[in-house]
Image: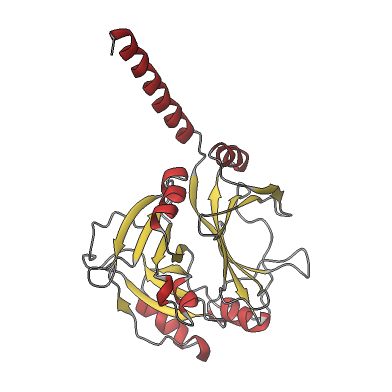
Amino acid sequence: MSAIKAIAMMAILGASVSLAAQSTSMRPPITGIAKVSVYATDRNKSKQFYGTFLGFPQIASTSASAPMEFRVSSKQSIEVSPAPSGTTDFLAYIAFATSNIDSMRRYLVGQKVPVEGKIQTQPDGTRSLWVKDPEGHRIQFVQLPTHGHLLPVISSTSKNPTQPISQIILHAGFIVQDRAAEDRFFRDILGFVEGWQGGRGARIDWIDMRVPDGTDWLEYMMHDPTAKTAGDSGVLNHFALGVPDIHQAANMLQHRHWDSATPSQDPQIGRDGKWQLNLYDPNGTRVELMEFGPVRTPCCSPYTLPVPK
């Protein structure tokens, strides 16, 4: 190859790298989980579970047909929607917060990610768009109003409203069968960063992918489709609420007497080194209570997830 051709080739490669870096830099921040949405077959039972048992205040609705929504914090919520007929998967979608929804749409289109329809604006000023990941999970991106949720909560008729069990959604997880395909979407396009992976024995069962600009994470629940049994989706498709003291949280819930949500086990330390306790909503969706940081060294791989404040 002549010197002139070599220089020309280097210029082309340099331009390609520059364009790739420019494309990545165009992605607006993804700061955390904004919402987890679950399906329910009995509205009243789910309202008791999320509103009374877990203690989350219900956000006032602008429509009688709108899903119920429970406020975890000014920037996070849990949505409960009527279950579609015949559904066996009760995790409806996960919403991630971004600082600029218009830039996010341009970025996704530029990355050839199909975006469903136009950007939607909610009564409280929240703006959102929809995509699907390579395995068909519904993902929403939302730009919240500057001060978070603006709609008021429904006032409690009790003089002693129930204390919320948590003030933060730490992570949400769903079944993943093709890690490489999910990595191309969440890691390569969206910038998620692996924070830990572990499992039973030599097998990798869980992979924690942290949002690029925050402390929340998405958990790949690695699963062999040939081994699926009834009830798997409710256990694997789940979300986790952060608590400072798992035993204090367990005692609090024990005094609230919700038989159908009584955990099948005592608090335990997971493979990631953190105290945790599993609850299940009326439709079997796992709601994991989890302390913020490890109390012993996690197994399997280096643990780089930051401890949320």
Q: Farthest residue in the front direction?
A: 1
Closest to the observer: 260 or 147? 260
Query: On the rendered image, what quadrant is the N terminus found in?
Result: top left
Residue at 41% in and 48% down: 187
Q: Answer yes or no: is residue 308 visible.
A: no
The answer to whether residue 189 is left or right of residue 119 is: left
Decide: is 135 above or below 290: above
Decide: is 144 above or below 285: above
The answer to whether residue 141 is left or right of residue 121 is: left
Closest to the observer: 225 or 297? 225
Residue 247 occupies which quadrant of the picture? bottom left
Residue 81 percent across, percent down from the top left: 66, 71
Residue 9 percent across, percent down from the top left: 35, 18
The answer to whether residue 149 is left or right of residue 244 is: right
Query: On the rendered image, what quadrant is the C terminus found in?
Result: bottom left
Count of picture labels: 0
The answer to whether residue 146 is left or right of residue 213 is: right
Residue at 36% in and 86% down: 265
Q: Answer yes or no: is residue 121 visible.
A: yes
Residue 73 occupies which quadrant of the picture? bottom right
Residue 214 percent across, percent down from the top left: 43, 50
Closest to the observer: 237 or 244? 237
Residue at 49% in and 75% down: 233
Residue at 52% in and 75% down: 163
**What coloring was used for the rendering?**
secondary structure
Residue 17 percent across, percent down from the top left: 39, 27
